[in-house]
Image: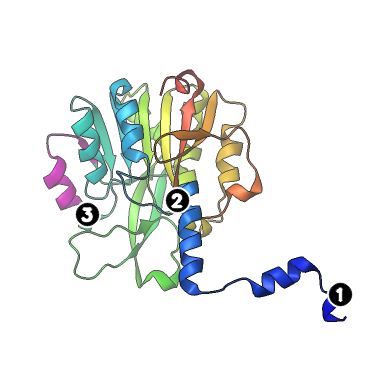
Amino acid sequence: MASSDVPATVELIKSAPTHPDLITACEAYIDDIKNDNNWDFYSNGEFVFLNRIAPFCHTVFDVGACIGEWTLKFLELKPDALVHCFEPLEINQPKLIQNLSGKAIINGFAIGAERGERTLNVVAEAGQDHWELASLYKRDAAIGETVEFKTSVLTLLDYCRDNKIEHIDLLKIDTEGAEMDILTGGRQMFAEERIMAAQIEYGGTWLGPRRQLRDAFDLMEGLPYTMAKLMQDRYMVVDKYWPALDNYQYSNWLILHNDIVETL
């Protein structure tokens, strides 16, 4: 094929600048628009969302509490809320107790899809007084050396039955890829409209358990809940799933009871 026969779009692609700094800048711009890969609590929309929902909350679950930083921030907004924290990793529990003693109910086991015992896979963060990368699923070897611990697991339904909890106002889930396990184990509670809102972390950690955002949409199908993506100053309602949503970039998603979608 003569050079004159090459489609113009191909020539454009071939001549496009490939400077690494430009590529990085473009990726950062797209991330900013989509609110992807922003871990900062105060700028990624989490703080804005909590400010809006906190007045409606009494019973709150922090699943994957680590050392309690999220709970402390929530309690600054709603000091009289009753927060149930779940942190199965023993190395984190002394700091969690130190931070939240007398302020929250602290549980040293995991929440999952079914009651039993599971292996907790943890990236050993040498020199740290707490470890943040614990998951019920195998971690990518590139992240670091992984150690294993056994942990007890209850479902949301189990825990609520055992403790006579009728309703959860806000369910926050940050479990390094096991988010769908928690939602699956609590589906009956969603079906019974006993959960007002859930905030779940999504990203590359979902690759280990072979999960997709599609699974969350499917789980909520037919129930009176709305899926939404957390943006910097609002949330964006997503009426239905489409494949491009599964980009495995870090973001936060909401599951909101239809009654509060227009309120927040």
Q: Secondary structure at mark 2?
A: helix
For the C terminus, which image quadrant?
top left
How far apart in space, not on screen, are marks 2 and 1 (Cα)?
39 Å
The three-letter code of the residue at mark 3 reads Asn
Q: Secondary structure at mark 3?
A: helix
Mark identifier at residue 32: 2
User: On the image, which quarter does residue 100 sit in?
Assistant: top left
- Give the class, few, some or many, for how many residues have Cα within 10 Å of label 1's Cα (few <14, many ≥20): few
The residue at 53%/29% (across/down) is 226
Is residue 186 visible in this depiction of the protein? Answer: no
How far apart in space, not on screen, are marks 1 and 3 (Cα)?
64 Å
The residue at 48%/33% (across/down) is 255
User: On the image, which quarter does residue 142 sit in?
Assistant: bottom left
Marks 1 and 3, the one that precedes in the sequence? 1
The three-letter code of the residue at mark 2 reads Asp
Report the span colored magenta: 93-106
Report which residue position mark 1 lands on: 5
Q: Is residue 103 magenta?
A: yes
Look at discs 3 and 2 and give the one toward the viewer.
2
Colour pattern: rainbow
Look at discs 1 and 3 and give the one toward the viewer.
1
- Give the class, few, some or many, for how many residues have Cα within 10 Å of label 2's Cα (few <14, many ≥20): some
Q: Is residue 115 magenta?
A: no
Return the residue nearer the eye: 204 or 138: 204
How far apart in space, not on screen, are marks 3 and 2 (Cα)?
32 Å
